[in-house]
Image: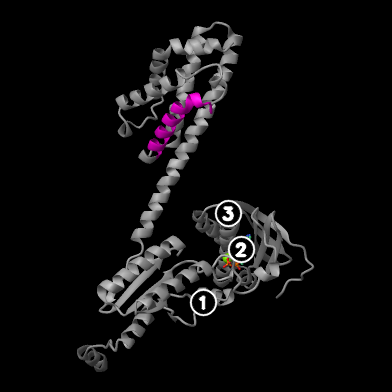
Amino acid sequence: MEPSKKMEIIPLTRGTMMVFKDQDVVPFRNEVKEYAERIKMGLVNQTKLITAASEMVRNMLKYANGGLTIIEIVSRGPQSGVRVTFKDEGPGIADIPQAMQDGFSTGKSLGLGLPGTKRLVNEFDIKSIPGTGTTITIIKWANG
Amino acid sequence: MFENIIKTLKSNKGEILELWMKNQLASSVITEDLMTNQELRKQSEELVNALVNNLNENSINDSQSPDFDQLTELLGGISISRARQGFSPRETGSFILSLKEALLEILKKENSNVNEVFEESLKLSRLLDNFTILTFETFIKGREELIMRQTDEITDISTPVIKVWDGILALPIIGTLDSARTQVVMENLLQEIVKTGSGIAILDISGVPTVDSLVAQNLLKAVSATRLMGADCIISGIRPEIAQTIVHLGIDLSQVITKATLASALQYAFKSLRLEVRKTALEAAGVTNQ
Ligand SMILES: Nc1ncnc2c1ncn2[C@@H]1O[C@H](COP(=O)(O)OP(=O)(O)O)[C@@H](O)[C@H]1O
Ligand SMILES: [Mg+2]
């Protein structure tokens, strides 16, 4: 059941976490997991969400020296989900379509983080201003 | 106006130390097991000297003045060593906070002008508060270093390479496979391959909670390195939810032998070494007899 796109997304619970070191990745993932468990998200969706979130913080660490994450439980109509926002003040991404391509990487890695994340979640939004920073928002619905 | 404070404190160094010692011992938070009274006294005396001797018209307004370099260094050393020894933050904080109390008490005793004492106290408090903050910052840094070291130790002990059969090695990976960990895993694995002359290595990832593209890349690196050594590598313990996620991420494991469980990986390994696991004739007979 796909909820209507016109319905408003309402944030319910909200937490923030700074990610600046490799050591912050695991506690961050555990936090995301806790939010997902709270809305009784199934194991497969939980794993997809946590993996997507992991990709995004790793990018933040690798390309922007870290940043801020906001984890929220959101609802839209009868659906509930977890929304995670990643904000960094790094170099930004000049060519977003290129960065979204499978296999494109400026960091000698697999180049699957951005495109893979988009496939793993239900909503994916990326805004980036070169020289200013990047903000990425993902939503995974509990039954999405 | 503040010459007064400086003069008062300089001429009462001995009493400051006594008062401070009394405060520290009275607050009873000092864990005697961790430090003897003599050690504490020596530390305290050094600190009082470093503070009072370097107090002047300028430095009294600036906790970061070069005049306090020695004091800052002493305080840093004390906080770090206390963090490592397992002092609580309260114990470490009250160390410097009780010095402030001793100083204020001396000021009060030596000057009967309430207004002046108030102004002096404010000034001195500001300075000492800054030192307290510094103490906490260093204390936390000490604790973080401790945690970092322990993390390294855990990385070391949690990557065992087990020889499960002649020619077969198993590597249960527990936790996340970041780049530093991969390095350790690969070194251990390659070393063991050479040492035992094994032809098959099983990397079991049942204990890896999240397989993102970095972990996958590291796994692939380990597989390639194993192959370069002339051995085969099997990845086992891929849970169904992880398998689905990997596919969506777009990671290609088609060039790697993957198995759902360590048992099926072992079975595969036996088969490729032309080994067979069978029930013994006796047991088999027992089963048919029933
Ligand atoms: N937060 C970010 N800030 C700046 N550049 C980024 C950020 N995230 C991704 N990028 C750029 O997008 C590219 C693709 O990212 P991704 O798909 O995760 O692959 P990979 O991390 O393996 O390179 C990166 O190589 C990098 O150039
Ligand atoms: Mg990436």
Numbered circle sitting on residue B243: 1
Separation of residues labelled 2 and 3 (CA atoms): 31 Å
| Mark 2 C-beta to ligand 1 under 8 Å | no
The tag earlier along the polypeptide, 2 or 3, is 2
What percent of the width, then of the height, locates residue B38? Answer: 30, 24
Q: Picture quarter containing residue B74?
A: top left
Secondary element under disc 2, as helix, strand or loop, is loop
Name the residue: 44% across, 72% down: B221
Numbered circle sitting on residue B61: none
Placement of the N terminus of chain B among the 4 image quadrants: top right
Secondary element under disc 1, as helix, strand or loop, is helix
Q: Is residue B78 magenta?
A: yes
Q: Residues within 10 Å of mark 2 (few under 14, many from 20)?
A: some
The number of discs equals: 3
Reading the image, the residue beneath label 2 is A39
Q: Residues within 10 Å of mark 3 (few under 14, many from 20)?
A: some
Q: Nearer the viewer, residue A21 or A47?
A: A21
Separation of residues labelled 1 and 3 (CA atoms): 30 Å
What is the three-letter code of the residue carrying label 3?
Asn
| Mark 3 C-beta to ligand 1 under 8 Å | no
What percent of the width, then of the height, locates residue B170? Answer: 33, 73
Placement of the C terminus of chain B among the 4 image quadrants: bottom left
Which segment is the magenta one?
Answer: B64-83
Of all chains, the one bearing label 2 is A
What percent of the width, then of the height, locates residue A77? Answer: 74, 66
Numbered circle sitting on residue A65: 3
Of all chains, the one bearing label 3 is A
